[in-house]
Every structure is written in C-alpha cells, then in structure tokens.
Image: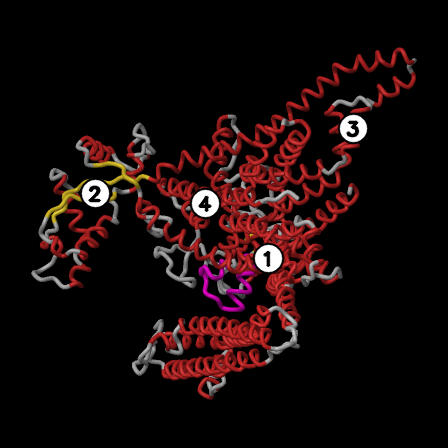
C-alpha cells in the first residue's frame, strides 16, 4: 500500500490516519481562530468608544465557526462521495466499457479492483484489466486526497481570515452564533424522522421485491411455510412455500401465553403495590420487579431454553403429556415473566392517576378496599390499563431472543401449546443469519415479515399511546 | 351486590343495617382473598427474580475456575523434530503436538494400543501445545531442558473435576471412559490436577474448545460498539431534546417529530437490525460484523430512549429559572445553555446510562448485521469483525458441549454485573444531583 517514493507513511494520501490528521488540523485552527477572534474583540472593546454588540466569547465562537464549519462540511461531503465517484470514473474507462458486462459482473469486477487497490489479493492478479484498473483506482484516490487536503487548507485559511475580519463593534455575533446553533439543533431533531423513513423505505423496498416473486395473497393467506427449500434457484422445489399463516398463529399463541401470565400478575401486583402495600414493601418490591425489565432478553432466552423448557418436559413426561423441548409454552411463560414489569409499571402509573376523591367517595359509601379497587378504580382506569396491555402485547410480538433460543424453527399450524411453533421474529433471524444473496425470495421474505411486524406493532403503539394520553387528559 | 341493593331499597330503615351486617362477613372474606391474590402476584414476581438469578449463578460460577494438570515437560529437540541451531521458522512449525503426546505417554508408560493412547491424549486441552510453543518461541534456550508446567486440561476433565459428569452413569453415555476417570483420580491423589482462576476466560476470544474460549474478544467488541453508540446517540439525543423542549414552535411538523420519536421507542429492536442490514450494509456498503455498524444501529435504537429521558429532565426544571434568566436580559439560547441545561444534565445522564444499558444487552439487531460470526481474534479497531457479549452468550448456548453452557452462564454473570453497575451508577447520579423544586 505504501509506495517506496513516500518517505512519511503517515502523510501518505491513502493512509487512514490521513483523514484524522485533517480533522485534528481543523480542530486546532478553529481553536486558534477562537482565541484570535476573542482577543481582537477584547482589544476593540478596550480601545473604541463604541460598545460591542455581543460578549467577546461570541466573537470568538463566530470566528471558530467560520474557520472550522465549512472545512468540516467539505471533508464529510468529500469522503462520502469519494468512492462512488472514483468507481464511476473507473467504470467509464474504455477498457471496461468495451466488455459489456451485466450489473452483477460489474459489481464483482469492481470489488476485485477495490481489493487489488487495497493490496488484498484474493483471486489471480494476472488479469491485465484488474491490474491496470486498480492502478488507475489508486491514482484517482491519490489525487482525490491531494485535492481534499488542498481544498480543506484553503477553506480553513479563507474562513479564518474572513471570520477575523468581520469582527467590528456593530457586528451582531451572538445573533449569528445562536442562529447557527439553532440550525444545528433543528437538523439533529429531524433525524428521528429520517430513521423512521429509513426503516419504512428499506423494509418496504425489499418487501415489494418479495411480493413481485410471491403474490401478497399467497403470503398473507397461505397455510404452508417452508422457505428453506428455496436456497438456490436451480434446485428442485426451489419455489419454496411462503404462506405466513402458521408463522402468524405461532406468534399469536406465544403472545397469548405470555399475556395470560403477564396481565394478571402485572396488574395485580400493580394494584397491590399502589393500594395495599406498606411504604417499606413498595420501596423494596418495586425496584426488584423492575430488575426484570432491565435483564437482557438473551438472558431470558437462556432461562427459557436451559431451565424452563427441560423442567416442563420432565413434568410433562411424569404426568404423561408429551411436551416438546421447544414448546410454545416454555417460550410463552418466560416471555410473560419478561413483560410483567411493563404491565405493572404502566398500570401503576395509570391507577395512581385516578383522583383520590374517587377512592374517598367509594370508602364513604362503605365499600371495602377490594370493592373500591374492582368497581371504582379499575373501571376508571380501564382505558389506561388496556393501553398498557396493548403496549405489552406489541413488546411480546416483537421480542426476538427468547423465541429464537426457546421456540422452534418448523412452522407448525397447531393450537397445541405443548408443540413447537415458530414466530415472525424467529423466521426473520433464521432467514437472514449467515451469508445470503439479496435477490432470492428466501431472504426477501424476511423483509416482508419485518414489514408485517413493523405495521402491527406500530398500529398497536399508536392505539395504546392515544388511549393512554386521552385517559391522562381526562383526569388532569 | 345488585341483589343486596334492591333488598336495601325495599327494606325498612331498621332492617337495612341487618342486611348490610349479614353481608359483611362475606365481603370481608372477599377482601382478604383479594389481598392474598395481590400479595401472591408480588411474591410470584419476586420469586421469579430470585429463581432466575439463582439458576444462572449456580450454573455459571464454576466457569471462573479452570482445571489445570501439572506435567513435567522436557523440550526434547528430537521429539520436536529440530536440528541444531533451529531458525525461528523451525521453532514455529516444530512438532509440539508430538511433544505433548510424549509427555503424556511418559506419565503413564503402561498405556498401549491406539485406542487407549487416544484416550490419554484427550486428557489435555489441544491448546496446551500452543502454550508450549509460545514458551519456546519466547525463550529458545528452554530447548532440551525440563520444567514443571500447569497445562489446561480438556473440557471433559474440567467438567468431571467440577462434578458435572455423573460417574454412576453407564460408560457409553458419559463423555469420559472409566479408564480416563481413574487417570484423573490418580492425578488428583498426587496433587497434579487442580482448579485455578480462569484468566483465559477474560482474556481470549472465542474458540471451538471450551477451555480455550473466552469473552475477551466479545468484551472488546462490546466496548467498541458502545463507544460508537455513545458518541452518536448522546449528543444527538440531547440536542434533539433541547430543541423540542426549549426552542421548537408548536406546529404540525414538531408534532410529527414527537409522535415519531414516541413510536420509534416502541419499534421492535429486530426491525432496527433490518434497517441496518438494508441501509448500512447493502446501500452504503459498510463492512459486515463490524462494531461501526453495530454501534450505528444501536445508536438509532437508543436515541428515542435518550430523547424521552432528556425531555423529562428538561421539563422538571421549573419555569422560574428560565424566567429569571430571561428577566436578567439573557437570550433564549443563553438561558437554555447556561441555566436550564446544567440543571437538567444529571437527569439526562441518568437517562443516557439507562439507554446504554439497554444497548449493552441488545442482541437481535446485531444478529442481522452479521455480528454473530465465530471470531477468534480480539478486535483491534472499529472495522474489525467482532461480536458482542450478548451474542457470544447466544453462540455458546448453541454449542453441544456441556462446558459451553457453563461458560455461557458465566458470560451472563459478567453481563449482569456490568448492567447492574451501570444502573447503580444511574441511581447514585440521580440521588446525588436530584433537586426538589
């Protein structure tokens, strides 16, 4: 990688350190600009009769921004475009254009050239095209970095001088700096939108490609799921079966089992903690239950696969029930334990939000505490409780590690909780783990499942959040 | 109750009290049952926590020790196949495996037959010869001398020493034969086999041999990944929270952003993995299995948590602080940055620590971006292929060897220790800087 005519390897244009040096240089010159700007404004305020518009630090900040910001923008834009541009230039050379390659072949060739340029030898390097192109690639890289260096230097110097020269008593530096800061904050806060758009687009595009191969109705209503057969297009039975009903029912069953555990336990403990428990019990039991929420899901998966599942199988053997070692029951129970704290802490908030006057009214009529809870508090808090249960369900549907480790891979269409079933998340993981090519129906199916998962959890969340918010407003 | 109400309505005033009184016992009984059920739910929750910790702890604690065998190793250059004045390369490629076998044969000279010999060789870890090679390469003058060395035992011997292998079982259904067990027992009587602190577990990367596998590589990968997550998510999250809470006008666009953030917090983590796969790996062509990509994905995932916590922290700063600053002539930016932000910072830090703790335990999205590979080397930089602690736990659990289950539990213990200390840090921070207004 390092050529012989280069004496200082660290300053070599291909060297990775190179960009870091550039960034450090930018930082250093910004700091220098800051001190110079501040000093100039201090001098101005001492000498001139006019008062400065802003505090001296703002003049310093303004100089630093003038010096560093354009350079930073330049570097980031340059680096993000560099590879793409270079590859475009290489592809458009007559040597490669004359070969009339398909897109795939072109990608393959390009990655070989890239590797050769980086000094990684994978295939035979005797190919003249690759050696020549990789040399051109290296040269382009070299020039690109040289231009970047020069341009950044110009940016730093021009920006610094300009920032320094604008300093005068009438210059409103604080307004300018605050404007830039606010701009920066706006850009940051829109990132959440971009993430959502990114999720939707990435999952949607791949799903659309999948639905071109497998019709939507087959996917949504088909009763057979066996995507593993469709590994290569030239295999027998390469079409596979992509009917997602067994996967959906498996997910539903595990979620149902989980909710059968989490809903009563979570709700009752929330009621007990908020209505009955002494301060001491509340202040010890609540954090301990919340530990459950902080435990990583992989630990629950371990617990389900190695402790609960064998325990269930042994009990099943003793009472003569055939419980599979990957039964829906084991995964469901552990998932229920996992979401207990979600239900309990959300319902706790909701129950506490019911005004004390309602409790007092009920007690005044002679109701016992349990009657008050069951006939006044729960009905009053019902929307909020339902909201918290919906959030818990969406959590259970999207949970991955427990089911990956404790539930099965085979998609059985069954209502028996002792048998192995599979879930949406398990299928996504098994379809995408390992190396895969991106145009087979098998890998694209994972994105279609992901899209379903995203849509369902999104709907549940939107409903739950609106319900909870409406409910809170009611009592505020 | 509706029955009793109608009874009360129809009854005369004197008998109303009687009706209520007659129902009292039943109602108090109900009250008691309800109270018991509630207590039962709490006890169930607490017992689960205890059971979970106990079962993992009891499975995992033994992995912090490892069985070693004391052998007198003679670095015989003939056995190693070395001539006089061996070069560095000769030393690299010498027959260390043969040397270990020879040492074992010397220990039990009566062993004959290929089958028995193979059983004998299986007492010592295949990694033992790496250690001997390392010693010779480090100090070539050791050649043709003898020294006493504690070498790692095979994982099956380790399991036997830790009592995980049932000696009463039929010989065929055990991983160690009767003969091997008598050898180990004899070594134990001579004091030549014992358990020591397992430093390999903390230092080395993954391995196919349980006794050589460690979480060093995974911990390094976790550190790199979380570094990226923190440097991205913390400033971004705080900046967003400040803007939304202090500067943003109330309009549709801002409402959209807020709804988005709330929903992103509840999107299943695996969907973020799909995003990482499609956008970072396929579109931007970033390397697979790299902590950079893992950090990016986890940053997007923890961002909503940090934003929500930071907004709550900003909301808890009373408006009087802002008004006082503005009243003194500070600009909105000055009041926010110099007065509100320092007061909200502890809350923001607490929220960020909790968000990072969640990122530390996250597994599913990292499976999607290929951080699930078998990686022996400890990663050195952000683009090296690596794995993280939770994924390592998952990988080991898939292995058939009993010893990997033990190691997996031990890795869980390490992970939980990290998580609990992060949470304790958050609690301390909150206690120390929390201000009641």
**Would you say B35 lies left or right of B429 here?**
right
Marks 4 and 3 sit apart, C-alpha to C-alpha, by 45 Å
Residue B316 x/y as whole percent: 66, 48
User: Which residue is the site of mark 4?
Assistant: B418
Q: Earlier in the sequence, mark 4 or mark 1?
A: 1
Task: Determine whether B47 is above or below A306 in the image.
Answer: above
Residue under disc 4 on the same chain as residue under disc 1: yes
Separation of marks 4 and 1 at Cα, in angstroms: 24 Å
- How far apart are the two marked residues, 1 and 3, measured between alpha carbons? 42 Å
Give the residue at mark 2: B150
Q: On what subunit does the disc labeled 2 rest? A: B
The residue to which callout 1 is attached is B238
Q: Chain of mark 3?
A: A
Residue B286 position, x and y percent, is 48, 66
Residue B402's place in the image compared with B14, above or below, is: below
Of tags 2 and 1, which is closer to the observer? 1
Q: Is residue B289 magenta?
A: yes
Query: Mark 1–mark 3 contact, CB under 8 Å?
Result: no
Residue placed under numbered mark 3 in the picture: A360
């Amino acid at each position: 990688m390092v050529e012989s005519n280069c004496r200082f390897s660290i300053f070599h244009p291909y060297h990775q350190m190179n960009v870091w040096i550039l960034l450090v240089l930018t930082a250093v010159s910004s700091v220098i600009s800051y001190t110079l700007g501040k000093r100039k404004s201090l001098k101005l305020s001492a000498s001139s009769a006019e008062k400065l518009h802003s505090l001296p630090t703002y003049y310093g900040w303004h100089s630093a921004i003038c010096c560093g910001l354009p350079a930073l923008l330049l570097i980031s834009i340059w680096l993000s475009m560099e590879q793409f541009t270079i590859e475009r230039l290489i592809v458009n050379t007559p040597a490669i254009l004359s070969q009339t390659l398909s897109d795939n072949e072109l990608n393959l060739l390009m990655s070989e050239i890239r590797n050769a340029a980086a000094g990684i030898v994978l295939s035979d390097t005797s190919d003249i095209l690759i050696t020549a192109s990789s040399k051109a690639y290296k040269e382009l890289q070299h020039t690109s970095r040289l231009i970047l260096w020069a341009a950044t230097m110009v940016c730093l110097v021009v920006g610094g001088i300009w920032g320094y020269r604008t300093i005068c008593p009438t210059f409103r530096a604080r307004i300018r700096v605050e404007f830039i800061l606010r701009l920066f904050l706006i850009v940051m806060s829109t990132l959440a939108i971009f993430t959502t758009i990114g999720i939707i687009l990435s999952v949607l595009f791949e799903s659309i490609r999948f639905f071109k191969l497998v019709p939507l109705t087959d996917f949504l209503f088909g009763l057979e799921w066996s995507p593993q057969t469709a590994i290569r297009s030239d295999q027998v039975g390469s079409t596979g079966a992509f009917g997602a009903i067994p996967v959906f029912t498996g997910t539903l069953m595990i979620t149902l089992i989980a909710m059968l555990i989490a809903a009563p336990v979570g709700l009752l403990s929330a009621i007990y903690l908020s209505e009955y428990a002494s301060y001491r019990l509340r202040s010890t039991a609540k954090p301990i239950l919340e530990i459950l929420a902080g435990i990583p899901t992989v630990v629950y998966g371990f617990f389900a696969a190695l402790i609960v599942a064998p325990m269930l199988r042994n009990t099943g053997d003793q009472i003569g029930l055939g419980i599979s070692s990957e039964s829906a029951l084991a995964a469901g129970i552990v998932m229920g334990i996992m979401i207990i704290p979600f239900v309990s802490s959300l319902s706790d908030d909701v129950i506490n939000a019911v005004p004390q006057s309602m409790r007092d009214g009920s007690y005044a009529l002679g109701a016992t505490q349990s009657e008050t809870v069951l006939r006044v508090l729960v009905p009053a808090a019902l929307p909020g409780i339902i909201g918290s249960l919906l959030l818990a369900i969406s959590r259970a549907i999207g949970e991955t590690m427990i089911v990956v480790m404790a539930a099965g891979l085979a998609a059985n269409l069954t209502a028996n909780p002792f048998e192995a079933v599979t879930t949406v998340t398990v299928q996504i993981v098994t379809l995408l783990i390992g190396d895969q090519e991106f145009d087979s129906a098998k890998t694209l199916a994972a994105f279609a499942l992901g899209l379903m998962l995203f849509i369902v959890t999104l709907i549940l969340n939107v409903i739950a959040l609106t319900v909870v918010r409406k409910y809170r407003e009611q009592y505020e | 109750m509706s029955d009793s109400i109608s009874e009360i309505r129809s009854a005369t005033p004197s008998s109303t009290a009687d009706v209520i009184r007659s129902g009292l016992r039943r109602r108090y009984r109900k009250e008691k049952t309800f109270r018991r059920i509630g207590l039962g739910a709490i006890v169930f929750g607490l017992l689960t926590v205890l059971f979970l910790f106990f079962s993992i702890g009891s499975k995992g604690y033994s992995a912090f020790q490892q069985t070693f065998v004391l052998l007198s190793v003679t670095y015989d250059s003939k056995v190693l196949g070395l001539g006089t004045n061996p070069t560095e390369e000769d030393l690299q490629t010498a027959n260390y495996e043969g040397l270990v076998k020879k040492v074992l044969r010397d220990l039990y000279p009566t062993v004959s037959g290929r089958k028995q010999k193979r059983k004998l060789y299986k007492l010592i870890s295949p990694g033992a010869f790496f250690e001997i090679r390392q010693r010779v390469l480090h100090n070539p003058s050791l050649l043709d001398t003898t020294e006493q060395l504690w070498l790692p035992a095979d994982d099956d011997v380790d399991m036997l020493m830790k009592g995980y292998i049932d000696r009463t079982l039929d010989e065929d259904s055990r991983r160690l034969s009767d003969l091997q067990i008598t050898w180990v027992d004899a070594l134990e009587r001579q004091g030549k086999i014992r358990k020591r602190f397992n430093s390999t577990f903390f230092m080395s990367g993954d391995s196919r041999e349980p006794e050589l596998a460690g979480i060093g590589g995974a911990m390094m990968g976790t550190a790199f990944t979380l570094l990226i997550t923190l440097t991205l998510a913390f400033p971004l999250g705080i900046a967003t929270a400040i803007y939304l809470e202090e500067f943003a006008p109330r309009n549709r666009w801002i409402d959209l952003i807020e709804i988005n953030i709330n929903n992103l917090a509840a999107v299943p983590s695996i969907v973020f993995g799909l995003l990482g796969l499609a956008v970072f790996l396929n579109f931007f062509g970033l390397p697979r299995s790299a902590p950079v990509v893992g950090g990016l994905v986890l940053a997007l995932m923890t961002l909503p948590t940090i934003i929500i916590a930071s907004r709550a922290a900003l909301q808890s700063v009373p408006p009087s602080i802002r008004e006082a600053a503005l009243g003194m002539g500070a600009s909105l930016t000055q009041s926010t940055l110099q007065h509100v932000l320092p007061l909200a910072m502890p809350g923001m830090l607490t929220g960020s620590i909790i968000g990072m703790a969640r990122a530390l335990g996250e597994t599913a999205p990292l499976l999607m971006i290929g951080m699930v590979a078998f990686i022996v080397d400890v990663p050195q930089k952000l683009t090296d292929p690596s794995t993280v602690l939770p994924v390592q736990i998952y990988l080991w659990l898939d292995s058939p060897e009993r010893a990997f289950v033990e190691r997996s539990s031990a890795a869980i213990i390490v992970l939980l220790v990290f998580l609990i200390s992060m949470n304790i840090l958050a609690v301390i921070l909150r206690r120390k800087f929390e201000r009641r207004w």
